[in-house]
Image (cartoon, rainbow, N blue to C red):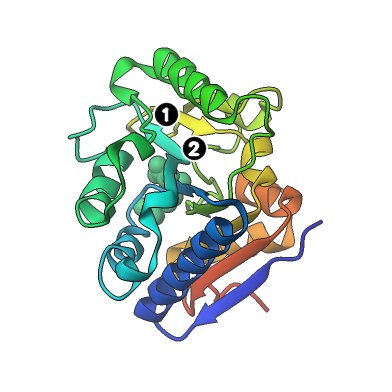
């Protein structure tokens, strides 16, 4: 059982800034220790403002982007220019202004359909990590009000995958077909952070921190080091 470091910030902007600072520090530490940072980013809407902070001075100018490899925690099976694309959101919010080389952005090709996209993402990870353990340096995750994280949804088979780094997932709401990193890979990361904001996430946050009965809780349980960034509304379910 991993004890999470929980940070409750006084406002949403302060939660964004604390999360951006955590990512910046994680990147700098990884690059200093290993010469590169393999960074996994969350989709959805919550982290967009965090990515804007990373892509804007002063943080942008302090981060060694040339040593950062960008990965995606999950993707919807839509084209990259679709409004539902996690890659599309991250491209607009971060990659348009942060000098990450195209070769360092490892997009999940969701437009190819869930099976082909899953196969291709897994193959790319295999090529990049080779025989080395599939351990990411920094992972940012969001959380749904049902306690899902990445595209690991309660009751979906992807949550039970233990022998592969990537799985096809089925969401309860459109876009239905998703590709996701699996629980073992997310939990193996050197540093994991959740960002959850707003009253609507309060119960999921409580369950993530005090039970093992939602997917986000299983990541928290199995991960080495977990930070949680909340505003006061998202923390309102905690005693
Ligand atoms: C996705 C995300 C997912 C997200 C949660 C929260 O593809 O939707 O990866 O895990 O983090 O659904 O989404 P919001 O930030 O939009 O609430």
Residues at circles 2 and 1 in contact by the CB criterion of under 8 Å = yes
Q: Count numbered badges in the picture.
A: 2
Q: State whether label 2 is within 8 Å of ligand 1.
A: yes
Q: Please, what secondary structure does the residue beneath circle 2 have?
A: loop
Q: Hey, which quadrant is residue 187 in on the image?
A: top right
Considering only vertical position in the picture, is 182 above or below 12?
above
Q: Position of residue 6 (x, y in %)?
A: 63, 73
178 sits left or right of 60 in the view: right
Q: Quadrant of the N terminus?
A: bottom right
Name the residue: 44% across, 18% down. Answer: 120
Q: Please, what secondary structure does the residue beneath circle 1 have?
A: strand
According to the picture, the residue beneath numbered tag 1 turns out to be 178
Name the residue: 45% across, 86% down. Answer: 10
How many residues crowd around disc 1 within 10 Å: few (fewer than 14), some, or many (20 or more)? many
Q: Which mark is residue 151?
A: 2
Q: Quadrant of the C terminus?
A: bottom right
Q: Residue furthest bottom?
A: 10
How many residues crowd around disc 2 within 10 Å: few (fewer than 14), some, or many (20 or more)? many
Name the residue: 31% across, 69% down. Answer: 61
Front-lying residue, 104 or 151? 104
Q: Disc 2 or 1, which lies upstream in sequence?
A: 2
Q: Position of residue 62 (x, y in %)?
A: 37, 70
Q: Residue furthest right?
A: 1
Name the residue: 44% across, 14% down. Answer: 115
Front-lying residue, 59 or 206? 59
Q: Hey, which quadrant is residue 59 in on the image?
A: bottom left
Considering only vertical position in the picture, is 109 above or below 83?
above
State how far apart marks 2 and 1 are (Cα): 7 Å
161 sits left or right of 147 in the view: right
Q: State whether label 1 is within 8 Å of ligand 1.
A: yes
């Amino acid at each position: 059982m991993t004890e999470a470091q929980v940070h409750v910030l006084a406002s949403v902007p302060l939660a964004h800034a604390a999360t951006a600072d955590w990512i910046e520090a994680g990147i700098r530490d990884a690059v200093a220790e290993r010469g590169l940072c393999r960074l996994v980013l969350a989709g959805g809407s919550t982290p967009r403002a965090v990515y804007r902070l990373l892509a804007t001075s002063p943080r942008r100018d302090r981060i060694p982007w040339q040593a950062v490899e960008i990965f995606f925690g999950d993707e919807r099976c839509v084209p990259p220019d679709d409004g539902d694309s996690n890659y599309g959101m991250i491209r607009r919010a971060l990659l348009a202004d942060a000098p990450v080389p195209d070769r360092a952005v490892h997009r999940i090709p969701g437009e190819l359909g869930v099976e082909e996209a899953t196969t291709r993402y897994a193959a790319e990870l295999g090529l990049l990590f080779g025989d080395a353990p599939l351990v990411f340096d920094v992972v940012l995750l969001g959380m749904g009000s049902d306690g899902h994280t990445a595209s690991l949804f309660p009751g979906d088979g992807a949550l039970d995958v233990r022998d592969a780094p990537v799985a096809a997932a089925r969401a309860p709401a459109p876009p239905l077909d998703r590709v996701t990193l699996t629980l073992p890979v997310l939990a193996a990361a050197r540093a994991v952070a959740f960002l959850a904001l707003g009253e609507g996430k309060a119960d999921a946050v409580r369950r993530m921190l005090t039970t093992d009965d939602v997917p986000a809780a299983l990541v928290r349980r199995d991960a080495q080091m977990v930070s949680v960034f909340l505003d006061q509304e998202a923390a309102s379910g905690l005693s």
